[in-house]
């Protein structure tokens, strides 16, 4: 299911500031559920965002050696963020709660219902998530989560309706929050090569624009001008720290 350019039109005005930022500024978070091929998107009112890269080492102690011998194992990536999901009217509140409900349903696996045992798991609840260049598959332009989102799995999803100040819209016995806080953790499964490799007597990044879409190297043998400039600035700062200033 593709994202329509005028996806956010609640309030009757797609050019209202929040809708405009989502529709034209692409400031939205999209969740794509691989088993069902369904998408859910919310305007991106980000409250917190953390992109955690954790390197794991096996440190082996050797008799008589003060420092252990480290052996690298892996580097994992987990993205955690909190978003506020706001509703300008009852229609948007209903859509927001429906979207939250869809994501909660998507946390469960796909089951095989044929045969004697209908509870056999047939597929895992994998997602692709897209948020501008912060949550984007490397070497891809911004598109839909299906095409350019990061692949991974959620280790949980927290739904917290604002009870005190924002209030609710009511329809019969149903309450639709005007504001929802959603908190989640997303474990990334990278679909592209990571790390570094030799090329033309140089060491280059295997995926140049990982993880936020900026180039590290222009070619296998030439670092970017930005990197060279940064190296010069860093070297100058190091000289300022290590070299004593001469009196004039």
Image (cartoon, rainbow, N blue to C red):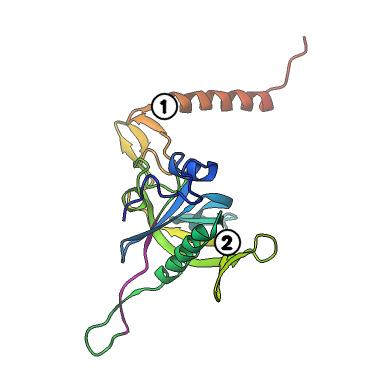
- Residue 179: which quarter of the image? bottom right
Side of 165 where 39 appears, left or right: left
Question: What residue did someone put label 1 on?
Answer: 224
Image position of 236 (left or right of 127) = right
**Percent position (x, y) of residue 87?**
55, 56
Given residues 201 and 172, the one toward you in this image is 172
Residue 206 position within the rendered picture, expressed as x and y whole percent measured from the top left:
34, 42
Q: Residue furthest left?
A: 115
Q: Which mark is residue 214?
A: none
Residue 165 found in image quarter: bottom right
Give coordinates of residue 197: x percent, y percent: 34, 41
Q: Does residue 248 sit above or below 77 in this rendering?
A: above
Residue extending farthest to the right is 247
Disc 2: which residue: 180
Q: Is residue 63 among what the camera can see?
A: no
Task: Please report the bounds of the magenta region as a residue range.
Answer: 119-128
Secondary structure mostly seen in the magenta stretch: strand
Residue 22 can be seen in this image: yes
């Amino acid at each position: 299911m593709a994202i329509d350019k005028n996806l956010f039109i609640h309030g009757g005005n797609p050019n209202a500031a929040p809708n405009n930022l989502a529709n034209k500024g692409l400031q939205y978070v999209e969740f794509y559920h691989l088993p069902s091929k369904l998408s859910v998107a919310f305007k991106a009112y980000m409250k917190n965002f953390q992109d955690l890269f954790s390197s794991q080492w096996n440190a082996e102690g050797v008799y008589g050696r003060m420092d252990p011998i480290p052996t690298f194992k892996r580097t994992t990536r987990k993205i955690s963020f909190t978003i506020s999901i706001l509703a300008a009217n009852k229609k948007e509140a209903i859509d927001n709660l429906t979207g939250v409900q869809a994501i909660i349903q998507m946390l469960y696996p796909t089951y095989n219902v044929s045969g004697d045992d209908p509870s056999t798991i047939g597929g895992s609840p994998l997602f692709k998530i897209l948020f501008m260049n912060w949550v984007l598959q490397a070497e891809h332009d911004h598109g839909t989560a299906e095409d350019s989102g990061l692949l991974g799995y959620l280790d949980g999803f927290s739904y917290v309706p604002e009870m005190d100040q924002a209030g609710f819209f009511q329809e019969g016995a149903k309450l639709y929050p005007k504001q929802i806080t959603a908190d989640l953790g997303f474990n990334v499964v990278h679909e592209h090569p990571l790390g570094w490799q030799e090329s033309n007597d140089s060491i280059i990044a295997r995926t140049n624009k990982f993880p936020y879409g900026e180039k590290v190297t222009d070619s296998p043998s030439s670092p970017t001008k930005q990197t060279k400039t940064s190296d010069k600035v860093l070297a100058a700062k190091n000289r300022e720290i290590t070299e004593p200033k001469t009196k004039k």
